[in-house]
Amino acid sequence: MRDIFPKPSKETFGKASLAVEKFRKPTPPINLKQKPLSLLKIYHHRHKLTALLIFLFLTFTLIFNLRGTTQPTIAQEERSSLGNKLALLPLIGNATSSNLSSPSPRRRRPKVESVQPVSYPVFSVGGWLLNGAEDGFAYLKGSYYPFSEVSFFWLEMAEDGVSLKEKFQYLPVIQVKKLAYERNIKTYAVVTAQHTLSSTVLAEAPLKEAFIENLLTKIKELNFDGLEIDFEMLNQDDAENYLAFLKELKNRLTPLNLELAVDLEARINNEVTLDWQRIAETADKVRIMAYDYHSRATAIPGPISPVGWVQEVLEYALSKIPAQKIFLGLPFYGYDWSNDSQNQPQVKGLTIADIAQLIAEKKPELKKASGLDERGYEIGKVPYFTYQDNSGTMHTVWFEDKESLLEKVELAKRKSIKGIYFWRLNGEENSFWQDLKNSLNQ
């Protein structure tokens, strides 16, 4: 490689040395007996200087000790490993990090996931979920489902009156509970019983106690938020035994911080066999099943949940139960009435999805009922239709749609009750939830 800095010649060196000699001055002789002036000053002030040095030494020692009490000395080999840990602590500032050999940048404190108290809307929405309706529970993932509670029809009193039968498989219960927890949805385990069996168990103290023990064991397995009792068709003779059962169950649930919900069949003033007021004093929530005005038990077709009848049921409930404990149960289904060859009535229950498929196949003329029924109740905006099957038999179908359901939702809102509950989830039109959400926001 070519040298781009040429070396100076001897002639150049000679000229430079002569120039340096011209600028040199003679050095004065050194008098070894005479002390320099600066050293004399230091010598005369030596005592003050000593005192100053002592003062500085004590001052720095004190500062070091004070710092040591607030910031512990960390061994060199530990500093690099502790650097990242100390950086997570929000109360330690940059001073600590600067003392570490390998300081880490300060990071935000990681968010701790913990169970927080859940705040539910003033007007709550929930429903009952049956076995087979879970479908992987993607159903609960949509942001437009305004649920605050879900009840699992999971447990049933066994034939011995003590043990329990599970209607759900174990894994789907875990899956839906996980999704419900992620969305702050409360979960309840529903317990049902055949009415003659429940009547016997409620009257026998040993059987009742054993049944309660099994209930508590089962509900604690999956950490539900509460237990829901759905004992239907009880008669007046069962009223006191049923109330005693609910009180004992409530006393056992309260220390576990679990709620007690009770399902009641819709009744009006002159039809009630159970004491709704005393039941409400024990239960945390009461769900009134305001449907089956016409049902499998009625030979004549008609509306399942006419708005005039629902209003009377709700008004009676409000006379006995605090409004903030009441959930109004509404139907996601319909009935298909027909007569067999012997002219005997045949009634079949249909989900909203079943009805939609039937309408697509038969293409019947859809009608809306209006006016009053034979008992004087306002029917409301309830749809129905008729069709003929392949054998020539005529059928009449009554069901609930978005318009008829939202009419009753508005009634519940006007009465300022706790909320509404649907029987049963996963049986409705998908678009209903957005319409409901819009109604609740009005």
Image (spheres, rainbow, N blue to C red):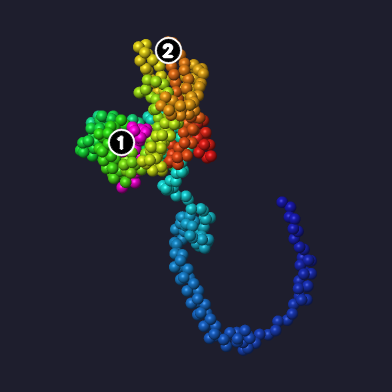
Mark 1 / mark 2, whichever is N-terminal: 1
Spot occupied by residue 380 in the image (x, y as percentages of width and height): 48, 29
Q: Quadrant of residue 36?
A: bottom right
Depth order, front residue of 182/288: 288
Identity of the residue drawn at 25% across and 30% down: 197
Seen in the picture, residue 2 relative to 286 is either above or below; the reply is: below
Q: Quadrant of residue 226?
A: top left
Residue 258 colored in magenta in the image: yes
Q: Name the amino acid type tagged 1.
A: Leu
Q: Name the amino acid type tagged 2.
A: Thr
Instruction: Give the residue pinned by disc 1.
Output: 274
Identity of the residue drawn at 48% across and 36% down: 410
Identity of the residue drawn at 47% across and 68% down: 67
Q: Nearer the viewer, mark 1 or mark 2?
A: 1
Determine crowd level at label 2: few under 14, some 14-19, many 20+ residues with C-alpha closer than 10 A: few
Determine crowd level at label 1: few under 14, some 14-19, many 20+ residues with C-alpha closer than 10 A: many
Q: What element does badge 1 sit on? A: loop
Q: Is residue 77 left or right of residue 206?
A: right
Instruction: Give the residue pinned by disc 2.
Output: 393
Spot occupied by residue 228 in the image (x, y as percentages of width and height): 34, 37
Stretch in magenta: 255-275
Q: What element does badge 2 sit on? A: loop
Depth order, front residue of 339/207: 339
Spot occupied by residue 9 in the image (x, y as percentages of width and height): 77, 63
Task: Mark 1 and mark 2 in contact? Answer it, CB < 8 Å.
Answer: no
Q: Is residue 25 left or right of residue 119?
A: right
Q: Is residue 405 left or right of residue 207?
A: right
